[in-house]
């Protein structure tokens, strides 16, 4: 999961040598390149626009305002449109694409991040309101060489299928460890109800979370 | 989303001055406070709300939850729903409020949503949320697509020819049963508004949902001291076990002595155009034996004026059974 996210941050590094380690995003980028070679001018433009580089706040809004955000311990001085959600800011301005856009209306939980250690929905949070806050995205939870115990548990328990909701599930699950949650599976299910999984990996997600909670208990 | 200017209020007076220039504090307000944003940002994305200015009130010192000298509780307008629900004093003295909040939304949303924001939570009526459809609440005079339309989840109490939208909040139902007071500071000073008077019926002006005027800032909510010996609970019936709005819910606060109900406060959710306090049900319960026959009489009284729509007739009996079961649970021996 986080392996993907890290490479998502620098898709331009996707070289021929890395082709075997294709990710969803690099795959789509390459599809764009393939389009440039193979199809008509009109279509290639459309494909080209879907490549990641084009997203990077190239056209600054005339309403842009200065905003300073602290994400995963790092300070960022940005100029963003006041309408920018925290989710779009993370993904399109900071290229932290671990947080996913599912519904964009606070109904699916794929965009879950932590603000000052508490889980929130980044799609319903205006980035400009987060000045002074400690924002943590999936990238700040763990990295491929140093997985958070919850990430490792999701891998060990096969707690995903397509993986799209997984970063949100993990961000919720990590926050849940510090919340007043009862011991039963039903308690976990209730507090995880804001993270929807269309593949239906719920049973293994609960198993993964419970395994971390049991191991975290003092002996 | 339409663009807007963003300002951060540093103190309540500044926030009040900033929004005092608004044309309205109701639907379509050109200047709005923003707290957790869970309703407002969603509706702005849908272009249902198009404020030109947002005033950020998240950093105002309005997030305290504290005991009052009289034994009651004061709840800051910016206290997050999760902090309120898990607060030891709320769990101990006002279980119905904790249960109501925890039955609504999700952990993420409860971490964001504020007391004041939940008081002002907007309806989930699909026609209100869809700018392609007529809706008298969103666009006065355009008509109500819900009457005769998809109205399974909508209200049966307090409706009008213009609007049948349900108030979606669980917290508000508990606050109604607890007889909370909403404290507002505005350009003309401070007001204390009983929760029963805070929300208004749709009537011919469904765009108007509360008594708030431009510049009015909700500062806190107070609860009276818990009634001695009371038991309270919130029962919510819905299509899914979690993360779903109520089809019917009941908040009850009852005191029983020697098998007789000495005091009862009842409010219903999911069925009313506002949080639905039922003094009719309370009248049937007070000084009566805590039996199923009494509860049934109270439920019949609460739903006597129900006006079901084409798809939500089931709510009449569902709300009755919800209230009866809530009363059974709240009065059974500990």
Image (tube, coloured by chain):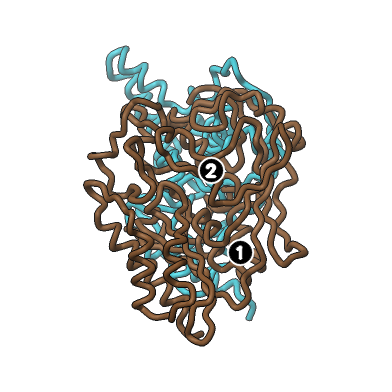
Chain colours: A cyan, B brown
- Residue identifier under label 1: B86
x%, y% of residue B237? 36, 62
Q: Is residue B183 above or below residue A80?
A: below
A139 sits to left or right of B103: right
**Residue at left offset 47%, top offset 64%:** B266
Q: Nearer the viewer, residue B56 or A15?
A: B56
Secondary structure state at the residue bearing disc 2: loop
B63 sits to left or right of B329: right
- Residue identifier under label 2: B120
B68 sits to left or right of B133: right
Residue B224 quadrant: bottom right
Q: Which mark is residue A69?
A: none
Chain assignment, label 1:
B
For the residues labelled 2 and 1, the Cα–Cα distance comes to 21 Å
Chain assignment, label 2:
B
x%, y% of residue B234? 47, 66
- Say whether residue A169 is visible: no
Q: How many marks?
A: 2
Instruction: Tell me, yes or no, whether dots 2 and 1 are on the same chain.
Output: yes
Q: Is residue A170 above or below residue B120?
A: below
**Residue at left offset 60%, top offset 46%:** B116
């Amino acid at each position: 999961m986080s392996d993907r996210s890290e490479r998502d941050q620098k898709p331009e590094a996707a070289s021929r040598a890395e082709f075997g380690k294709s990710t969803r995003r690099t795959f789509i980028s390459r599809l764009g390149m393939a389009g440039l070679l193979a199809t008509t001018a009109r279509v290639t433009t459309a494909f080209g626009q879907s490549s990641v580089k084009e997203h990077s706040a190239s056209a600054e809004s005339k309403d842009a305002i200065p905003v300073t955000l602290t994400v995963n311990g790092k300070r960022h001085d940005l100029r963003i449109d006041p309408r920018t959600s925290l989710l779009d800011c993370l993904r399109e301005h900071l290229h932290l694409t671990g947080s996913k856009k599912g519904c964009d209306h606070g109904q699916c939980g794929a965009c879950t991040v932590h603000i000052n250690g508490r889980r929130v929905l980044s799609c319903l949070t205006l980035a400009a309101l987060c000045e002074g806050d400690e924002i943590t995205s999936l990238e700040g939870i763990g990295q491929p060489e140093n997985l958070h115990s919850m990430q490792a548990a999701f891998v060990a328990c096969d707690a995903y299928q397509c993986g799209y909701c997984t970063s949100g599930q993990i961000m919720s699950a990590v926050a849940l460890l510090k919340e007043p949650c009862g011991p039963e599976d039903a308690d976990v299910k209730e507090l995880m109800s804001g993270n929807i999984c269309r593949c239906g990996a719920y049973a293994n997600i609960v198993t993964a979370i419970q395994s971390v909670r049991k191991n975290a208990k003092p002996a | 989303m339409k663009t807007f200017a963003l300002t951060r209020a540093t103190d309540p007076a500044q926030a009040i001055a900033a929004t005092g220039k608004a044309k309205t504090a109701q639907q379509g307000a050109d200047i709005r406070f923003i707290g957790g944003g869970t309703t407002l940002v969603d509706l702005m994305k849908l272009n249902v709300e198009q404020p030109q200015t947002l005033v950020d009130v998240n950093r105002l010192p309005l997030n305290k939850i504290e005991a009052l000298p009289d034994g009651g509780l004061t709840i800051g307008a910016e206290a997050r729903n999760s902090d309120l629900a898990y607060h030891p004093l709320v769990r101990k003295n006002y279980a119905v409020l904790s249960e109501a909040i925890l039955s609504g939304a999700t952990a993420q949303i409860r971490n964001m949503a504020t007391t004041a924001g939940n008081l002002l939570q907007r309806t989930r009526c699909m026609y209100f949320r869809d700018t392609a459809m007529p809706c008298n609440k969103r666009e006065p005079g355009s008509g109500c697509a819900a009457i005769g339309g998809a109205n399974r989840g909508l209200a049966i109490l307090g409706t009008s020819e213009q609007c049948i939208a349900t108030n979606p909040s669980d917290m508000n139902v508990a606050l109604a049963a607890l007889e909370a007071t909403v404290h507002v500071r505005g350009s003309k000073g401070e007001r204390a508004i009983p929760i029963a008077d805070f929300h208004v019926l749709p009537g011919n002006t469904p765009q108007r949902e509360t008594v708030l005027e431009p510049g009015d800032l909700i500062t806190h909510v107070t609860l009276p001291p818990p009634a001695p010996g009371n038991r309270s609970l919130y029962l919510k019936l819905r299509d899914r076990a979690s993360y779903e709005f109520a089809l019917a819910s009941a908040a009850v606060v009852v005191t029983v002595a020697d098998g007789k109900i000495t005091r009862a406060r009842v409010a219903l959710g999911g069925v009313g155009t506002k949080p639905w306090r039922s003094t009719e049900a309370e009248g049937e319960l007070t000084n009566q034996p805590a039996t199923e026959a009494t509860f049934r009489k109270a439920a019949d009284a609460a739903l006597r004026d129900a006006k079901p729509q084409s798809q939500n007739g089931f709510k009449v009996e569902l709300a009755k059974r919800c209230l009866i079961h809530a009363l059974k649970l709240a009065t059974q021996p500990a």
